[in-house]
Image (tube, helix red, strand yellow):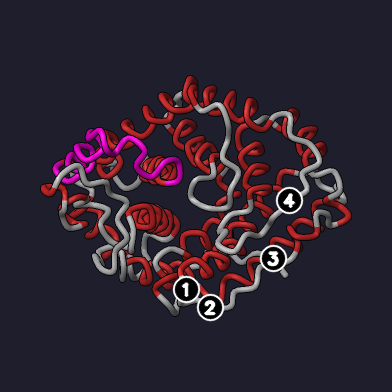
Amino acid sequence: MTTPSLTEEIALRFARIALGHVRREYPNKPDHTLAGPEDARTPSALHPVFYGSYDWHSCVHSYWMLARLLRRHPSMEAAADIVALFDEQLIPEKIAVECAYLAQPTARGFKRPYGWGWLLKLAAELYGLDDGRWGRALTPLAEVFSQRFRDFLPIATYPVRVGTHFNTAFGLRMAADYATVTADGAFLALLRETALRWYGADEDCPAWGEPSGDDFQSPALIEAECMRRLLAPGRFLPWFERFLPRIAEKQPAVLFEPATVTDRTDGKIAHLDGLNLSRAWCLSALAAALPMGDVRRPVIADAAARHLDAGLPHIAGDYMGEHWLASFAVLAIEEHRAA
């Protein structure tokens, strides 16, 4: 089993899926606090850019995926539709409304840290794409979220080690790409220092409790991927040896067994398809970070391939998974190569 490449055929399939839902307003699950009756507004009124895809964060990372697909295959059949979407949506007037929403006191914790990380990941992908106009339009919103990281991380005494949106390692890892692309050394240093403060002393991870019934991330593997992304190899490799010392023996065993999904119409159970894809992403990146000839490398790579094989057939079919899974499939197929 080998990791597939992001061929034009695969890119076109994923692009069509995303283009089918990024402007689909309903059903919608808003993350919205009402301070008064005047705040009872439609998703598109609250968020004129990211109102589709069932929820704000899924819409954001679907835009990221479309940007990545456009970068990889600018001549594919769906490219014109992606350009038209970005030209219509990623404009200063609409971004200003998204920024104004975040200025409300009730929005302080909006989408922390999952949506924060994905918005910055989108900004990093748009950086320099085409003539850069979409990235320039998104910059004010990206700056709001990068500042939120700067304000939040120093007061966040403890990490959040769950397999859902609140996982802090995921937020750090995605924000790192934005800090790198924008050459923001101070922001990158803050992310690295926070990762070391939260995770630097972790040893012999048992992966206890994985997977939980609605996980779409592995707390153990996303922590390792966060550290891989933020630490130089000379610091990461010794940490990884301490963190998962028995991985060559396929231990902890729970990290090597793809999750079973029993009902893809149930939004929480459908998360487990995402778990298989996000594990494949993290495992592929970790395998690639190990030296050639390291006995752990083929063991981890094989686990990545098996998880990808378990997740890829279920990208579409029911909207509970269809509105978000393709983004994680793209991460699993190729994202580690760009880091």
- Magenta stretch prevailing secondary structure: helix
Of mark 1 and mark 3, the one earlier in the sequence is 1
Residue tagged 3? 305
Q: What residue type is labelled 2?
A: Asp
- Circles 2 and 1, Cβ within 8 Å, touching? The answer is yes
Mark 2 residue element? loop
Q: Is residue 155 left or right of residue 260?
A: left
Q: Is mark 1 on a helix, strand or loop?
A: loop
Whole-angstrom CA distance, mark 2 to mark 3, is 23 Å
Task: Give the foreground label among 2 and 3.
Answer: 2
Q: Nearer the viewer, residue 3 or 268?
A: 268
In this rendering, does residue 270 appear at all? yes
Dot label at residue 207: 4
Query: Is residue 87 or residue 104 the one in the foreground?
Result: 104
Residue linked to disc 2: 263
In reply to whether residue 106 is colored magenta, the answer given is: yes
Q: What is the x, y in percent for residue 92?
A: 17, 41
Camera-nearest label, 3 or 4: 4
Q: Which residue is drawn at 62% across and 59% down?
A: 212
Query: Which label's residue is closer to the chain start, 2 or 3?
Result: 2
